[in-house]
């Protein structure tokens, strides 16, 4: 099994789960992890310099006449980041030479070139490759990947209960269409895989193959549930992904027992919750806060939430204080914008007022607060951007990191379908559908005016002022992980 992830400052959850399932059924598995072979882990966030600020301004530029250059620079950066790593290819080549029945790949969509190279090597040696990953349930994506040489099937399914039987079927030449979520190289496919229920039955991830001695801090990735209880934001591709569809929770007991077991196995007390929305089920975040210290003494943990408008969203001032008392150190949330009008247009299910309250309360409780946001949602006006700039200026003292992105048009999201259908009717038109990447490249004719650009420059100045500071003490071991 090849871990293509080079953000490898902690183990990859999907690999741990699938390896565990395979070993529980008696298979012998070898994991190739880039960091074990000296491929340096790529940092995600850091205390920024002026150069980072300039790069972000170029990346998010809306100046008319600059678009072509901006897009070429973006493409250059993407192509550079997506190049297959020669060391990973070398190690896969060695593993093939040593013998093995099958190669399993878990891929994100930026791994296309790596998958293609590995497929070619495996094909030459007569070893089948089975490919899976978070976005292969999207039909256009699976279609664009299925014909890579050497791949015997593309799987878009939460596969922990089927992986073992699938491997047997490949090795014995049996029909893979008996399993849900499979697309074959010739285009035939089985039924869509339903979201997995009874998550407590998923195996405890086996992270023993990861290079623990090379991680700056030993961090265990965890998931208390899959999907998001809100499930409505028009731009969100998380909730169309294999494991993100429909909200399902584990029991609090099974989460706490897993934390205890992983802490024992890997001699650590640091945890990263990868849930899309850790407060989907408010009693989960409260339950962890109240009880984890009796399972793992000294446990410290971080996670992402959605500041929704439910009466009890698990994020009250008292909840946040209790979370800190129970070991929570950082919290991340999707702020998206400082404009209520735009939040409503996105169907975000949150309010500017409550976001503001949350940021202040979380900071006051002692948490390092991070947020993500983006510009360029269809319909965004100058006034929206002014409000975003004002929001950031008002909350800069309480925010530790802001990730400010460009709006992405991702396949199968409601906004994607809308824009693709009406391309050119308004300021948005589609430049190219990139099914291989599960996204559409678009041209947005909004945002070119001088007032918008001034407001954006103000917002980005605040982002830089926030991001150049060192992370809040107490959360530094979790820097750059989200
Ligand atoms: C945690 C997370 C991260 C973490 C950790 C990543 C890691 N590798 O561990 C961090 C923060 C580092 C991260 C970074 C990025 N991420 Co991320 N991340 C996630 C998140 C929230 C959860 C992933 C997870 O652990 N899921 C839980 C497991 C159990 O589910 P799973 O991975 O789908 O695996 C199951 C099935 O897919 C299947 N399966 C998986 N592999 C295989 C293999 C075979 C052979 C088979 C049969 C089955 C199979 O079985 C598994 C078990 O049920 C997802 C959101 C989501 N909805 O999935 C985004 C997501 C995966 N990330 C995404 C992106 C875009 C990124 C970044 C590129 C963002 C960026 N610009 O920096 C980087 C790139 C990282 C990289 N790998 O190169 C996209 C991927 C889309 C894509 N293009 O493929 C997602 C879907 C979010 C989104 N909707 O945009 N990410
Ligand atoms: S709250 Fe977050 S995970 Fe849920 S639908 Fe919205 S963006 Fe997606």
Image (tube, rainbow, N blue to C red):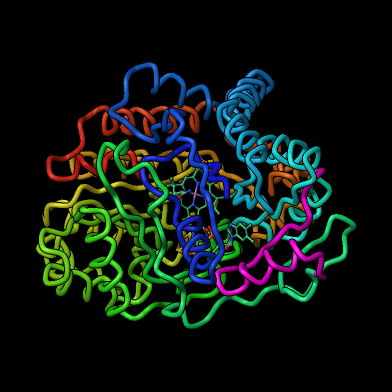
Residue 345 can be seen in this image? no
Instruction: Work out whether 454 lies above or below 240.
Output: above
Residue 140 visible: yes
* Left or right position of 197 against 240: left
Q: How many numbered marks have been drawn onto this rendered protein structure?
A: 0
Using residue 366 as the reference point, say whether residue 246 is left or right of it.
Answer: right
Specify the farthest residue to the front: 98
Give above or below for 329 relative to 222. above
Residue placed most toward the observer, 364 or 182 = 182
Give yes or no for residue 227 being in the magenta stretch. no
Magenta part of the protein: which range?
A: 149-175
Left or right: residue 55 compared with residue 100: left
- Residue 359 is situated, as x and y percent measured from the top left of the image, at 23, 53
Q: Is 163 inside the magenta-drawn segment?
A: yes
Q: Picture quarter containing residue 204?
A: bottom left
Q: Residue at x 48, y 75 (%)?
A: 247
Q: Position of residue 348 (x, y in %)?
A: 47, 62
Residue 445: image location, x then y, percent: 67, 35
- 429 or 186, which is in the foreground? 186
Q: Quadrant of residue 191?
A: bottom right
Q: Is residue 202 left or right of residue 251?
A: right
- The residue drawn where x is 82% and y is 67% is 189
Q: Position of residue 448 (x, y in %)?
A: 59, 29
Is the residue 192 above or below the residue 216 in the image?
Answer: below
């Amino acid at each position: 099994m090849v871990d293509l992830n080079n953000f490898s400052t902690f183990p990859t959850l999907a690999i741990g789960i699938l390896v565990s399932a395979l070993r529980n059924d008696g298979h012998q598995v070898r994991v190739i992890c880039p960091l074990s072979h000296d491929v340096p882990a790529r940092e995600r966030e850091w205390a920024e310099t002026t150069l980072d600020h300039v790069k972000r301004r170029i990346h998010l530029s809306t100046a008319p006449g600059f678009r072509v250059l901006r897009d070429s620079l973006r493409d250059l950066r993407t192509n550079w980041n997506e190049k297959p790593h020669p060391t990973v290819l070398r190690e896969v080549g060695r593993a093939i030479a040593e013998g093995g029945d099958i190669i399993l790949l878990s891929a994100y969509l930026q791994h296309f070139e790596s998958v293609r190279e590995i497929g070619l090597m495996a094909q030459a040696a007569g070893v089948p490759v089975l490919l899976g990953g978070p976005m292969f349930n999207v039909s256009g994506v699976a279609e664009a990947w299925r014909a890579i040489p050497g791949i015997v099937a593309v799987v878009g399914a939460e596969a922990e209960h089927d992986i073992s039987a699938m491997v047997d079927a490949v090795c014995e030449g049996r029909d893979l269409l008996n399993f849900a979520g499979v697309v074959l190289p010739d285009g035939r496919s089985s039924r869509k895989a339903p979201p997995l229920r009874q998550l407590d039955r998923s195996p405890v991830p086996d992270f023993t193959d990861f290079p623990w001695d090379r991680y700056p801090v030993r961090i265990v990735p965890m998931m208390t549930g899959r999907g998001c209880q809100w499930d409505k934001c028009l731009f969100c591709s998380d909730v169309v992904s294999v494991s993100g569809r429909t909200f399902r929770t584990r029991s609090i007991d099974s989460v706490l027992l897993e934390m205890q077991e992983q802490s024992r196995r890997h001699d650590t007390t640091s945890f990263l919750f990868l849930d899309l929305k850790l407060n989907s089920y408010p009693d989960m975040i409260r339950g962890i806060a109240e009880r984890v210290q009796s399972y793992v003494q000294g446990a410290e943990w971080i996670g992402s939430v959605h500041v929704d408008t439910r009466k009890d969203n698990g994020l009250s001032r008292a909840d946040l204080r209790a979370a800190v008392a129970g070991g929570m150190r950082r919290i991340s949330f999707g702020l998206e914008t400082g404009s209520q009008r735009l939040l409503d247009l996105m169907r975000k299910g949150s309010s500017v007022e409550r976001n503001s309250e949350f940021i202040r309360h979380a900071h006051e409780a002692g948490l390092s607060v991070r947020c993500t946001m983006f510009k360029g949602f269809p319909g965004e006006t100058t006034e929206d951007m002014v409000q975003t700039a004002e929001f950031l200026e008002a909350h800069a003292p309480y925010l530790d990191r802001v990730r400010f992105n460009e709006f992405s048009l991702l396949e199968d999201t409601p906004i994607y379908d809308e824009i693709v259908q009406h391309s050119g009717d308004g300021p948005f038109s589609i430049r190219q559908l990139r099914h291989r990447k599960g996204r559409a490249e678009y041209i947005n004719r909004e945002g070119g005016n001088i007032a918008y650009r001034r407001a954006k420059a103000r917002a980005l100045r605040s982002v830089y002022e926030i991001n150049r500071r060192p992370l809040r003490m107490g959360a530094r071991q979790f820097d750059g992980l989200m």
